[in-house]
Amino acid sequence: MQSKMKESDPILEIKNLSASTDNLPILKGVSLSVYPGEIHAIMGRNGCGKSTLSKIIAGHPSYNITNGDIKFLGENINSLEPEERSQSGIFLGFQYPIEIPGVSNLEFLRVSTNARRKFLNKEELDTFDFEELVKEKLEIVKMDQAFLSRSVNQGFSGGEKKRNEILQMALLEPKIAILDETDSGLDIDALRIVASGIKRISNAQTGIILITHYQRLLDEIKPNYVHVMSDGQIIKTGESDLALELEKKGYEWTDNFIKET
Amino acid sequence: MVNENLVKDVVKEPYKYGFVTDIETEKIEKGLNEDVIKLISQKKEEPQFLLDFRLKAFKKWQKMKEPDWAALGYKKIDYQDIIYYSAPKQKEKISSLDEVDPKLLETFDKLGIPLTEQKKLTNVAVDAVFDSVSIATTFREELAEHGVIFCSISEAVKNHADLIEKYLGTVVPASDNYFAALNSAVFSDGSFVYIPKGVRCPMDLSSYFRINSGDSGQFERTLIIAEESSSVSYLEGCTAPMFDTNTLHAAVVELIALDDASIKYSTVQNWYAGDEEGIGGIFNFVTKRGKCLGKRSKISWSQVETGSAITWKYPSCLLLGEESVGEFYSVALTNNLQQADTGTKMIHIGPKTKSTIVSKGISAGNSKNSYRGLVKMGTKATGSRNYSQCDSMLIGDQASANTFPYIKSQQPNSEIEHEASTCRISEDQLFYLQSRGIEFEEAVSMMVSGFCRDVFNQLPMEFAAEADKLLALKLEGSVG
């Protein structure tokens, strides 16, 4: 399916990627290409390697790439620091956003945004200009300004944390966003807000990878491709109807699929 | 808000105050005995009462034992191998700054404390102390118009002997502890502040202590008196050159606040800390105490301790006056092989007295950082309250942090609240910040600044920025 002729180069191109942590292999040869404007969903049981894949793309230091390449806009990024990846346009929305006591959310967002702007040769924003920008973006996730004066994620509810992630994505305007179970733990209203936020940010130049267990997010955001992961590999790729089938038949159905191969 | 750019600018700088000023000095022989004390007193042309004070203190000191209860380990100090008086050679009587050796002015210039009329800081009066003597005090005339006395303690002994005789040693008696006794016997210079009744000091007052000589100790003495309904904010900074030997610094600071008076005392301590192997650095044994003598009086200590090989320091408050208030806000950062045992004592004696303690200890490298504090409620301290919060942050897995809170209450109708926490900068937190484009060292700085925010908010503006810079500087290369 991915071999179809595309008009442009891929934003993200992962080839035969294997990775381990503490000598324990987690990824066992993953290949995935994301082209501009595409939305990919990755599904699979807990522990199949979905989150690991997202962390490795973002450059988490706990994992070693043992084989294969990750290319971003044609460049191999295997050895780039996480901050360099972020500055150049890779965004990871965390499954469990981290609390940073004492660091104000506003200052965190400003420093982060400026790091990206600096990379893009855009003027860095002072506190006043940044407040203007952030007010605009708060609309997207329907967050109150009071969020800005609190410490990063500290004391935020699950839904607030996820919306804060989408706010960061809106500010950083990444080329590719990997959203790791951004929908888990959200009530219906919060899910709608998050989904509409993602839709507003995505466009014909960006790529999105949604890691999810649930069809309900994919009802809101229709993916171009659905991949099923199992034991560190992508075992099946299909279009959006694959997710529906998966919801109906459960992961056991994919177990059968492994046996078939 | 702490300026993150400042942090970035200085993150790569080494200890930039490590230079030595090449200047001709007048030193006395190494060693300590009655003759040395008499000689110091004679050089300073002191009245008899002060010589008696010194000699009495010396006798007490000889009978005392160096304390060993702190969680500190260091080579025994040889008190006979120290020079107790060292002063740059100057003209006998200096009537204006023009007569101060330009090398000294240049030294303070380099430290960011310009003293000359044209360049001096505009919003703060400075007393500059170089080894054993005070070099210059700025804005004296302007302050005098308000009745504020701000001068070196040596001058105060000459010109305001009555105040010195009345108050010296009344907050920290010579027999208080080993290092206070030593200081009482040999103190050379320091600052004196007197704020008259009803006066709010029109500008911040500041002392800058510079150790230049490698083989002499520094024993400064500071005395601040705030009369009824007066207030003052006082800042203290300290630096020293890099020597591979240890230099002893044993200071005593006494504060006295009368009815409705308020004293805010802020310190940024950046004595040379020794190198990565723990060679050299200042041994900092300091006794600081304030007496809230008057009703509704207030004494607030804030300190940022980043320097010294050894820090032994417990700025304290004696809360005598009804409804008096004591505060202690502290950030102590240790790196490499530094050791700090620091905290406070809040002694509630009067009724309805209140104290607040906020201590933030950060240990990196192989350092050791202990909070030690005492909260005591006396029998008459009815309706008194204390709140303490002691947080430790560990960076890396070789550093250690301890908390020793002592609580003694003889008054059932009083409240003591203590909270403590320990955290480690986690890989997950760092990765989260990095994955948002924030560089590693800046991520650490942000988290450390965030951890210290409650204390930085208490510091005067310029100090807060300086403190933030200092922390970033000290942590360079300590993570990962």
Image (cartoon, rainbow, N blue to C red):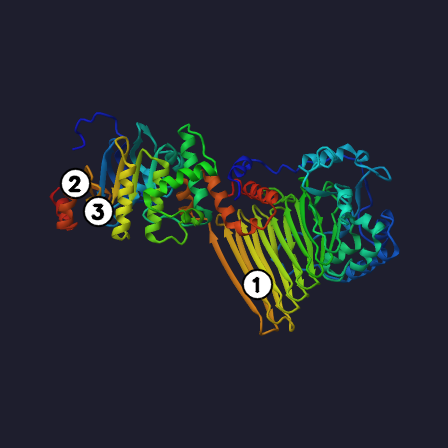
Q: Nearest the camera: B87 or B215?
A: B87
Name which residue lies at 84% across and 56% down: B162
Does residue B116 appear to the left or right of A63 in the view shown? right
Q: Label 3 near label 1: C-beta < 8 Å?
A: no
Which residue is labeled 3 in the image? Answer: A44
| Residue B210 seen | no
Q: Quadrant of residue B127?
A: top right
Helix, strand or loop at label 1? It is: strand
Q: Residue B199's spot in the image, x, y percent?
A: 72, 52
Which residue is labeled 1 in the image? Answer: B405
Helix, strand or loop at label 3? It is: loop
Which chain letter goes with mark 2?
A
Q: Nearest the camera: B118 or A29?
A: B118
Residue, far left: A260
**Looking at the image, is mark 2 or mark 3 earlier in the sequence?**
3
Which chain letter goes with mark 1?
B
Image quadrant for the N terminus of chain A? top left
Q: Nearer the viewer, mark 2 or mark 3?
A: 2
Q: Amino acid at mark 2?
A: Ser
Image quadrant for the C terminus of chain A? top left
Does residue A260 appear to the left or right of B207 in the view shown? left
Q: Amino acid at mark 3?
A: Gly
Q: Amino acid at mark 1?
A: Pro
Which chain letter goes with mark 3?
A
Dot label at residue A240: 2
Does residue B93 appear to the left or right of A13 in the view shown? right
